[in-house]
Amino acid sequence: MFNIPIQYEAPVYRPPSEWRSLLIQVTIGCSNNKCTYCDMYRSKKYRERSFEDILTDIKRCSSSGLTPEKVFLCDGDALGAPQELLVKTLRAIKEELPSVRRVGIYATAENILLKTTQELEELYDEGLAIAYLGLESGDDKVLHMIVKGNTAQEMLDASLKIKAAGIKLSTIAMLGVGGRKHSQNHIQHTARLLSETNPHFFSFLTTFSVPGTPYHTMLERGLIEPLTTYELLGEMKEILELSTFKLNKVIFRANHVSNPNPIGGTLPRDLDAVVSTINQWRAETPQGLYPVSPRPM
Ligand code: SF4
């Protein structure tokens, strides 16, 4: 939609809901870069960009006449950047791009827990409105297996901490990430964690094994047994049914390219309609069918 005058360091990723956002790279790569299923930033060595380089990008967009309403700060866990760099970046966006009404960012639980409450509040005051947290699972065994780098308790603490600072929380969970062996625990513990954290936004990705990743090797060696489409839809349905959202409504989406069919709604209001659609899909899905790989993400 924009003709962007920025030289990005590829590859660049953003959440599906940020498709209209101007992307600004604050960091390159991911400071964790260890999750076994993820190959997004394996080609990149993590580093923080200088403020001068970030400002050059922002000024180029400004002088090109861009008037974005939303900005998304990349790469994989830009919230891990030093506080001063983030504050200066948010101020520059406000000054140079006054049309911006929302700034979003990817965050890990680690990023959030390493910042003080005051620092998170400062980022909120400077315009950071939403953080996307890859929870993946609320089950400790699954989190350990995928080398997520944080426990379920840390995910819980981080979620509540960022919400308390005023920043909207968008939580992402992965269907099928624990394979058949951990599926029931993944369902129960993910639903519990979602209920306790009550994010403002929640979405599902479907787990696919990407060649070259440790997850793929584990799958090839039979250490993880993948779920069929029928079972993946069952996980989605059960997690949604078991989650109780009492603090605030949740905008739910499963519209990522990895999901076979897009679905969404506002929870708890639309739960029955969403579950009924999932039931219909399950009824039409052979039980032994495995999902096909998505387009490259
Ligand atoms: S924290 Fe996110 S971007 Fe980084 S390796 Fe894990 S899934 Fe990939």
Image (cartoon, rainbow, N blue to C red):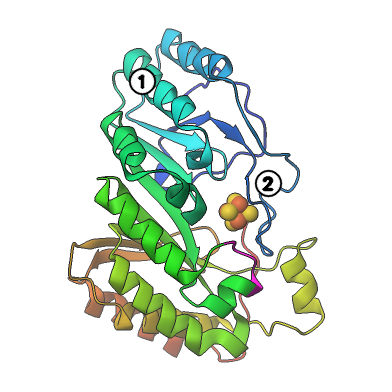
Q: Nearer the viewer, residue 130 or 114?
A: 114
Give me the disc on residue 41: 2
Above or below residue 270? Residue 238 is: below
- Give the Cα distance between marks 2 and 1: 27 Å
Q: Nearer the viewer, residue 206 or 230?
A: 206
Q: Closer to the camera: disc 2 or disc 1? A: 1
Magenta region: which residues?
Answer: 145-149
Q: Nearer the viewer, residue 38 or 22?
A: 38
Give me the disc on residue 91: 1
Q: Residue furthest top?
A: 63
Please say whether residue 146 is one of the residues in the magenta stretch. Answer: yes
Residue at 37 percent of width and 13 percent of height: 96
Give me the disc on residue 275: none
- For mark 1, give the secondary structure: helix
Image coords of residue 101 (percent x, y): 27, 30
The local crowd at label 2, few if under 14, some if 14 to 19, many if 20 or more residues have their Cα within 10 Å, is many
- Mark 2 C-beta closer than 8 Å to ligand 1: yes
Residue at 42 percent of width and 80 percent of height: 189
Q: Quadrant of ligand 1?
A: bottom right
Look at label 1 and name its amino acid: Arg
Image coords of residue 139 (percent x, y): 50, 78
- For mark 2, give the secondary structure: loop
